[in-house]
Image (cartoon, rainbow, N blue to C red):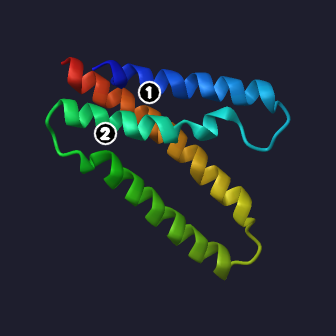
Amino acid sequence: MFLIFFVPIVGILFAVLINKIFPKAQFKGYDFLPLFFIPACNIITNFQKRPSFLPYGFLFFFILAIILTLGVAIKEKNISLSKMLHELWRYLSLSSIIWYLGLLFVMMV
């Protein structure tokens, strides 16, 4: 139960630390949040004794979205691939946080 809250807190502290160390970098600290929130989602589903593939199914869906986006970026050569991948990674960051909060809500109810 402790890890459910500890892992995301460590991720948030790591994000703040990255922002302090590299303030002008292209990446931000929140770009690392999925690496902490997706395992926390897995811990919650294991705690609830639900199928633990849910967070990794979400990650698999995201990887498929990247593959499809890469296909579009290759066909239409005027799209910046790095910007598109960074936007998709931001989407994963936000989605993993929302997923975590939703699982916390379901766990509390």
Amino acid tagged 2? Asn
Q: In the visual, does 3 lie left or right of 83?
A: left
Which residue is rendered at x = 67% and y = 33% of the image? 29
Q: Is residue 57 above or below residue 100?
A: below
Residue 99 percent coordinates (x, y): 37, 36
Which residue is rendered at x = 82% and y = 30% of the image? 23
Which residue is rendered at x = 58% and y = 49% of the image? 89
What label sits on residue 80 in the rendered view? none
Give the quadrant of the N terminus.
Answer: top left
Which of the 4 quarters of the picture holds residue 57? bottom left
Q: In the visual, does 58 lie left or right of 79?
A: left
Q: In the visual, does 12 lie left or right of 58?
A: right
Between 98 and 63, the one lying in front of the other is 63
Residue 32 percent coordinates (x, y): 59, 39
Q: Is residue 32 above or below residue 81?
A: above
Residue 28 percent coordinates (x, y): 71, 36
Between 36 and 92, the one lying in front of the other is 36
Give the quadrant of the C terminus.
Answer: top left
Q: Is residue 78 above or below residue 29?
A: below
Q: Earlier in the sequence, mark 1 or mark 2?
A: 1
Q: CA distance from mark 1 to mark 2?
A: 11 Å
Q: Dot 2 corresponds to which residue? A: 42
What label sits on residue 7 in the rendered view? 1
Residue 94 percent coordinates (x, y): 51, 37
Which of the 4 quarters of the picture holds residue 37? top left
Amino acid tagged 1? Val
Q: Secondary structure at mark 1?
A: helix
Q: Secondary structure at mark 2?
A: helix
